[in-house]
Image (tube, rainbow, N blue to C red):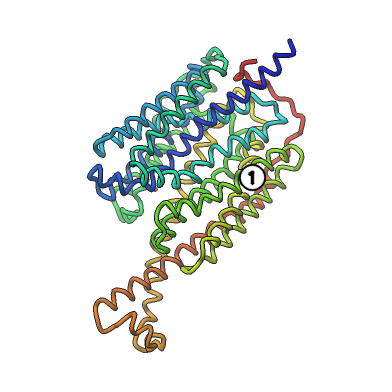
Amino acid sequence: MSEAAPAEGAINRRMITLSIMLATIIQALDGTIANVALPHMQGSLSASQDQITWVLTSFIVASAIAMPLTGWLCDRFGQRTVFLASIAGFTLASVLCGLASSLTEIVLARLLQGVFGAALVPLSQAVLLDINPREKHGSAMAVWGMGVMIGPILGPTLGGWLTDSYDWRWVFFINVPVGALAFYGIWKYIRPVPAARRMSFDMFGFATLSIAIGALQMLLDRGEQNDWFASTETWIEAIALGVSFLYFVAHTALSPHGKSFFDFRLLKNSNYVTGLLFIFVVGMVLFSTRALMPTMLQSLLGYPAFLAGLVTAPSGLGTMIAMMVVGRLTGRIDIRLLLGFGFALTAFSLWQMSSYTLVMSQSDIVWPGIVQGFGLGFVFVPLSAATFATLSPVMRAEGTAIYSLMRNIGSSIGIALVQTLLVRNTQTMHASLAAHVNYANPGLQEQAVGAAYNLSGGAGMMALNAEVTRQASMIAYVNDYWLMMILTAAAIPLLILIRPVPRHAPVAAGHAALE
């Protein structure tokens, strides 16, 4: 090999990394960037508050159902082909979203966007692992982690700015130039490898898993507004979830090797299974907190959408700094120590958030966010490295798809849990606080209070009720942060389940990069 070959290989590795991270970023962004634009879409598309949420849920459902297909598609058509088709389809679907003139059109376009975007995150992770030697997997996962986590961090801020400055349609049009660059880079620098075609398509397994995932997502998304199991719809979704998942497990367990949609050999790798457990917890904590913060700032503290996104964005600074640091430490320090430090920092930040009040300053929001971002950065990178360190390269496409799926399911369950508790705790605390609002309360006898809340008039009663609701809501948010803190702290003892990976363990070479 000539001296120029290693240099060329290094250049190609950098270009591949840049290209696949662009694809990862646009997919991760689209999970949250549309959130702040929903009120504008609602008016433009003449949709109700209940209907417009399908713009978000249709993307999540389609992505969750299509994601497990990644392994089979790569085996059938080749990794590079699937990557290019996913980027092209996702970019085209983004254009259709921006051009939509009705609710039906944008929901269908978001479904299409979710289907094509499902493979982007797991494929980017698999390619990065393929083109880097084992000793650089920590640094590679740091880069990948920054791309994945930039979505929930920057999505609301960027979406608010594009919507306020231009139009909500630019939330989707912004994907076009980025998608075009990613497509060109992958087409030019990733070497095509013939498809192995060792896996047969398991239609029954795919159908039962798809029904289970779709039913779970529908149950979580619509459960609160349907009053959960007081609704017939929720029972139907729960029964469909249970029956289809049981059929999937039984069918997969009884199918011969190579004939099942899901490869049970993945579950024989203890580090991989433990990694699935922890990424489920990370999904719950990360996305639940991200879902709580903007609504708390806007509804209780009066922040406009752009400012709410702006004060939560610095948490990304902590994440990126942590990922750059931990990428160099992975392989030198026991992964369990790095993970323990990251979970401890995340729990500490949630403890800080549990002391939030209605009179806090912007710095009270920014600093806990930075600490949480730093902690999650220390979790995300070594967790990815440990999860896939002992996994065979031929199983990475399917392994990374299931890994991303577990993160998405964790986030769905976490968001549904905190939102349900938020509503119920607000009602409970409102009743508790209102019980102390009566003429015998000496606080109501003060002149300033009497002037603000004139209990002899309807307006005064309404103002007092609004303030009690506001106080009750703040307590409910604090209770949610306490729950997330307890969940995060409870995960720390489980780190003993992760086995330390030998620093120089052999691994098969990847074939994604042009050498």
- Residue 146 appears at what percent x and percent y? 57, 39
Name the residue at the front extreme.
Answer: 165
**Residue 196 in which image quadrant:** top right
* 103 vs 490: above or below: above
- Residue 189 appears at what percent x and percent y? 57, 18
**Residue 457 in which image quadrant:** bottom left
- Residue 132 appears at what percent x and percent y? 66, 26
Location of the C terminus (image quadrant): top right
Which residue lies at the image location 62% right of the left edge and 16% below the top edge?
514
* 266 vs 57: above or below: above
Which residue lies at the image location 36% right of the left edge and 29% below the top edge?
93
- Residue 168 appears at what percent x and percent y? 34, 41
Horizontally, residue 172 falls left or right of residue 401, namely left
Residue behind mark 1: 321
Label 1: state its secondary structure: helix
Which residue lies at the image location 35% right of the left edge and 35% below the top edge?
110
